[in-house]
């Protein structure tokens, strides 16, 4: 993965050329998707995939660029979701300060980002499997705390009746506006991560992943950079958490359970951690399987089917779908260059 | 080739500069029962070029690790240009102008050559956390291009570090140490694994460094070490046991017996 900061862009390229054909085709398809999709496919597949794609993206930022695999991204999203329920309106008759969305959302995302930075500060002293174990412990502890605490988290019931706002004359809880809201925030997050990967901080993070000792010997405070990466990942996970609570209309300990934490990891691994598009590909595959596997093999076997597909993808391509595409692409290019093609 | 100088030359320069670049007072480092360094006292003038020689296990790299803060000394104090840096973390020492290279190249395999040097320049600037992409006119990018030329790696500007040859990776090691206005550099066996031609290039690069940049070089190849240093310190079993000019060290029978294989030279 070359990070050449200036060599990839020639001065003659306009913004459309810089964007690339793949991005343009994908953008057109995603914008036109509501014209052909039912409300079910818009929200349950489209919206849900974009939300979990953002969660996977926050993990990809940490794991792909920073070498820090986290199982606490759903916990960070859950903190934003709970914050929306507590600061805004809910119908659980607990808390619910009634703040308007434009005040509650920034506070919720800020809370998620700070919580993420705290988790990062705790875990950056470890590496590899130990980072996974610490973040899993934090995710599990938060789950049980939320389940047993009634003063803030309202115990196992959580909060219900949380609705996406209506503004600019648009009811954002409706299927099509909600899809576009998810798409807008997902594109914003994706573009920010893609651009940031070639920024000074992005290159720094990747260099720290490759050789933290050398980065210290170049004047970098490695821990501070890692914690800052957690903060940025927390912003993305926080935004996903806001969308998630608006999507579900509720938040409870089940939202931030260990199974959801592992779903995020599976999404990132299936999609691939080498490029920000990977988690979104992984999210589409996982969401489609979670939705339709039950129709194929029945309620008792659908998790087995999901597990088998995961195993096959990882077995065939340890780099996920992106790695698979990377291997197929040169062969396709060779085919197209053959005489008579 | 720079002519070797005597201790009095170094002392004269020290008198004029009024400060030591590096002062070690009774520096020791123990690993459990193992004494890796013991009672190291060393004073190096600003701009002085010193070779530290010794057999494997003499404590040379441990000395570097103690100076750069990779680990704290068990005893003793370290001053850099008059400031006590003994308890400072590594990155704070680097920001004061201290640099080092490694015996085994410590590089960023996933980055290009230019990006690696750019990060080295950026490491001592205030924009380390910038979320913007650097422009070609960025001051650190311009510095990186300049260093790229100085170490003769301009043909490999956008090459991935992982694909460089061993010799080119050693050159990049030196480039990273030269980035960001260094005042003193610790070179840890920079000639290790280089061909004779590459060693000649290395000597030329070291001798072409600006005069205000002092360094310590650890090197097993005496042809290289004695041609790029003004003064030599010998280490044995974690202690300094002899110091002198390159000529004195080369002519010393004890040194010849222990390190140069008896009838050397």
Image (cartoon, grey):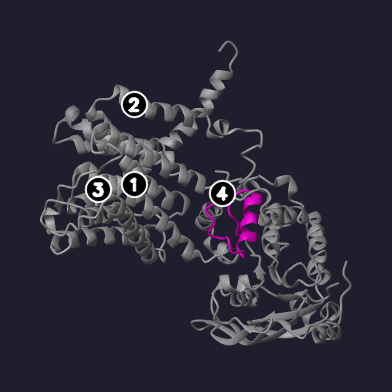
Q: Quadrant of residue B246?
A: bottom right
Q: Which residue: 52% across, 66% down?
A: A221
In front of the other: label 4 or label 2? 2
At x 73% / y 75%, what residue is drawn? B53
On the image, the x and y values in percent for residue A132 come to 34, 57
Q: Main secondary structure of the magenta part?
A: loop
Q: Residues within 10 Å of mark 4 (few under 14, many from 20)?
A: many
Which chain contains the residue that carries disc 2? A
Disc 3: which residue: A260
- Cα distance between the residues tagged 4 and 2: 37 Å
Task: Tell me the tag on residue A55.
Answer: 1
**CA–CA distance between discs 2 and 3?**
27 Å
Secondary structure of the residue carrying numbered label 4? loop
Foreground label between 1 and 4: 1
**Chain at numbered mark 1:** A
Can residue A304 be seen here? yes
> Rounded to the nearest whole Å, what is the CA distance between mark 1 and mark 2?
22 Å
């Amino acid at each position: 993965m070359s990070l050449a900061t200036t060599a990839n862009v020639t001065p003659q390229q306009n913004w459309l050329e810089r964007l690339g054909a793949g991005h343009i085709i994908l953008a057109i398809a995603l914008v036109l998707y509501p014209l052909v999709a039912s409300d079910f496919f818009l929200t349950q597949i489209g919206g849900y995939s974009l939300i979990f794609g953002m969660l996977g993206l926050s993990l990809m930022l940490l794991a792909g660029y920073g070498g820090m695999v986290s199982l606490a991204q759903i916990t960070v999203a859950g903190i934003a979701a709970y914050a929306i329920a507590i600061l805004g309106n809910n119908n659980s008759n607990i808390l619910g300060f009634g703040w308007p969305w434009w005040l509650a959302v920034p506070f919720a995302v800020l809370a998620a980002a700070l919580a993420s930075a705290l988790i990062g500060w705790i875990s950056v002293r470890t590496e590899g499997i130990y980072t996974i174990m610490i973040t899993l412990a934090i995710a599990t502890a938060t789950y049980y705390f939320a389940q047993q605490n009634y003063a803030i988290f309202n115990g196992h019931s959580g909060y219900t009746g949380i609705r996406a706002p209506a503004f600019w004359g648009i009811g954002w809880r409706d299927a099509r506006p909600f899809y576009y809201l998810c798409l807008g925030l997902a594109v914003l997050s994706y573009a920010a991560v893609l651009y940031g990967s070639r920024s000074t901080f992005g290159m720094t993070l990747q260099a720290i992943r490759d050789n933290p000792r050398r980065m210290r010997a170049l004047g970098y405070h490695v821990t501070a950079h890692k914690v800052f990466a957690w903060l940025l990942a927390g912003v993305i996970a926080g935004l996903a958490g806001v969308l998630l609570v608006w999507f579900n209309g509720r938040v409870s300990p089940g939202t931030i359970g260990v199974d959801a934490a592992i779903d995020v990891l599976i999404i990132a691994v299936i999609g691939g951690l080498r490029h920000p598009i990977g988690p979104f590909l992984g999210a589409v595959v996982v969401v489609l399987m979670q939705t339709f596997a039950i129709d194929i093999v029945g309620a008792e076997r659908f998790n087995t089917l999901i597990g088998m597909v995961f195993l096959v993808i990882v077995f065939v391509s340890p780099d996920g779908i992106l790695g698979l595409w990377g291997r197929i692409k040169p062969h396709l290019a060779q085919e197209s260059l053959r005489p008579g093609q | 080739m720079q002519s070797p100088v005597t201790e009095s030359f170094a002392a004269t320069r020290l008198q004029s500069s009024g400060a030591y670049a590096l002062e070690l007072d009774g520096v020791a480092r123990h690993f459990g029962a193992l004494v890796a360094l013991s009672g190291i006292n060393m004073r190096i003038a600003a701009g002085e070029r010193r070779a530290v020689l010794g057999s494997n296990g003499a404590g040379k790299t441990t000395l570097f690790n103690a100076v750069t803060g990779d680990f704290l000394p068990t005893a003793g104090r370290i001053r850099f240009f008059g400031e006590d840096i003994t308890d400072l973390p590594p990155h704070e020492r680097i920001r004061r102008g201290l640099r080092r290279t490694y015996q085994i190249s410590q590089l960023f395999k996933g980055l290009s050559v230019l990006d690696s040097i750019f990060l080295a320049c950026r490491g001592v600037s205030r924009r380390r956390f910038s979320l913007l992409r650097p422009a070609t006119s960025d001051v650190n990018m311009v510095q990186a291009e300049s260093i790229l030329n100085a170490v003769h790696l301009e043909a490999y500007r956008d090459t991935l570090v992982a694909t460089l040859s061993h010799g080119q990776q050693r050159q990049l090691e030196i480039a990273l140490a030269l980035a960001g206005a260094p005042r003193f550099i610790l070179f840890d066996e920079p000639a290790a694994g280089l061909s004779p031609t590459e060693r000649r290039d290395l000597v030329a690069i070291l001798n072409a460094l600006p005069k205000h940049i002092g360094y310590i070089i650890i090197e097993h190849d005496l042809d290289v070490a004695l041609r790029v240093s003004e003064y030599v310190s010998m280490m044995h079993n974690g202690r300094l046991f002899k110091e002198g000019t390159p000529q004195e060290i080369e002519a010393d029978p004890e040194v010849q017996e222990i390190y140069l294989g008896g009838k050397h030279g």
